Amino acid sequence: DVLRKCLNYNPDVKAVTVTHNETSTGVTNDLQSIAEVVKGEFDKLILVDGISSVASIPMSADAWGLDVVATASQKGWMLPPGFAFMSFNERAWAAHAESRMPKFYLDVAQYKKYYEIGQPPYTPAVSIMFALDNALDQLLSEGMGSVFERHAAVGQFTRNGIKSLGLQLFPRDERYASNTVTAVTIPNGVDATALVGKLRTDHDVIVSGGQASLAGQILRIGHMGRTTENDIQDTLDAIEDVLPKVGFNG
């Protein structure tokens, strides 16, 4: 309803940008429903940040009518940072053709032109290309359906474990809790900086705190790619050990 109201109030909007999976808050947006409003009801372009969802959480660019989807190598693809991937549909290409915004290095038309002759327009991260070849072998041999199910299982395992420690998930509605990163509300009286620091120094466990306005308020645990339930159990055990040392009385 908020999205509809916004688009009704701003009829000149050409495109809507949306993050599919928000790592800052541990929330996965209902992208399919959002796309149905943007495309089906208002006929606008929809541009999607799929950095932490593609190859981890189900998404169908064609079936959902997503005009542009961008992702990157360092999340579900299990690679170092350095590669970006984008999909454009025909409507997105038509919009690009009409665009008068100056562009050069990030002009996707150049990449399309060179793609058609089998080479990149500029020097690529060749080492990541070789790593991508291996990652694709792993993903496709497992099957993407199984990959998504595995992420869902690890995500649920993480959330159950967090709740068993007496902690609360940051997303108000667990239906929208991410299967690639879990955000946990820091209890009153707990020093978030000390918690993150002691997990690293005492247990060699690396987690992230909150960003910007959420600094000191949440803890974030990543569980995408090859993260297993055993990895998460080690993390949960470490959190359980450290919590009483940083002010938790639950």
Image (cartoon, helix red, strand yellow):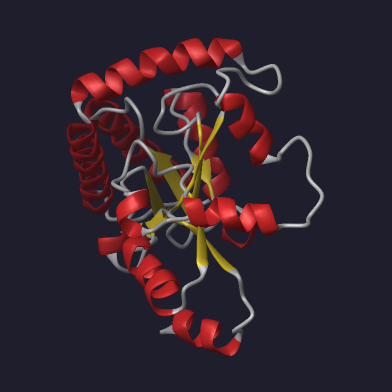
Q: Is residue 169 left or right of residue 73?
A: left
Pick the front one: 192 or 151: 151
Q: Residue at x 39, y 33 (%)?
A: 76
- Whether residue 82 is visible, yes or no, is no
In the picture, which quadrant includes the C terminus? bottom left
Residue 83 visible in the shown view: yes
Relative vertical location of residue 201 with respect to residue 130 in this rendering, above or below: below
The image shows a total of numbered marks equal to 0
Is residue 37 depicted above or below 207 in this figure?
below
Q: At 25% from the left edge and 23% from the top edge, which residue is drawn?
A: 140
Q: Residue at x 54, y 83 (%)?
A: 6
**149 left or right of 179 in image:** left
Q: Nearer the viewer, residue 131 or 233?
A: 131
User: Is residue 157 shown left or right of residue 173?
Assistant: left
- The picture quadrant where one finds residue 155 is top left
Find residue 197 and report its horizontal and vertical position in percent: 55, 35
